[in-house]
Image (tube, rainbow, N blue to C red):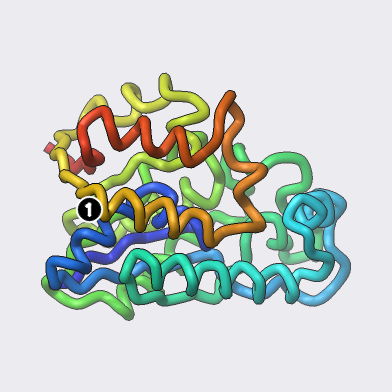
Amino acid sequence: MRWIYISPHFDDAVLSCGGLIFDQAQAGIPVEIWTIFAGDPPPGPLSEFARFNHSLWGTSTGEETIAMRKAEDEQAAAFVGADLVHFDIPDCIYRLSPTGEHLYTETVTTCPNPADKRLPRQIAAAIKSELRKGDVLICPLSLGNHVDHVLARQAAESLHRSVWYYADIPYLLNDPLTLDPAIAPLESELFSISTEGLNAWLEGIAAYKSQISSLLKVEGTLYDAIRSYWAKQFGIRLWHIL
């Protein structure tokens, strides 16, 4: 029985569940991270918004960015003991309309563009092609309303099978008040995480060197915030439908 963590981007599953993933892998549970929006950008010029994000990450071209982030993801997965599957759908900052316009040019925390209406079906088909009967599927709650997190959750739910949810980090840390409304109809279960799991989690996060400086929007370091998050219950909660 594999545990499949749906990660919209290269860092989401490790950021949110890295310690649990490590402890599961150490216990002999097969764990995989499936990164959905890991595809190369389409040909053509990048939007100003994409170029701005590249400047934060220290890259220039889309191809350079994806190659770097894949390498970071591979290093992080090695720290937490998970296998990786990278899907070929581009990140929202690269996606285009059928007529070639950039779909997301100002923010990623927004409702899906109408041009993305078929994307959950496409993602679901890609996930379904890799799933086995006994797999446990874990997807983001989509805290923070990042469009790619929303689409990934819609795709997972459209499979009509049991789904567990994780709280999206850093969005939960940046705005804790978003959690209660999201989990109101759900049942939670606490999963303990060892000190070794916490340390592996922090090492995994540190592998995403291009992302660290732009993730946390509140005072303090991301590492301190993760330690505090873990220390509240010495683990994390996952949620499922009642």
Spot occupied by residue 210 in the image (x, y as percentages of width and height): 66, 57
State whether residue 116 is above or below residue 99.
above
Q: In this image, 174 relative to 18: left or right? A: right
Task: Place residue 204 in its image quadrant.
Answer: bottom left
- The residue lying furthest to the top in this view is 177
Residue indicated by mark 1 = 163
Q: Nearer the viewer, residue 185 or 141?
A: 141
**Front one among 15 and 37:** 15
Q: Nearer the viewer, residue 179 or 198?
A: 198
Query: In the picture provided, is 98 more to the left or to the right than 186?
Result: right
Give the residue type that dot 1 points to. Val
Give the quarter of the figure containing the N terminus.
bottom left
**Where does the image place residue 47, in percent across and percent down from the top left?**
84, 56
x 49%, y 25%: residue: 175
Image coordinates of residue 34 in percent, x first then y, are 39, 68
Name the residue at 72% across, 66% down.
98
Taking 177 as reference, is 116 left or right? right
The x and y percentages for residue 140 are 37, 48
Find residue 213 and report its image quarter: top right
> Is residue 112 among what the camera can see?
yes
**Residue 166 placement: quadrant:** top left
Which residue shows up at 25% across the image and 69% down it? Answer: 31
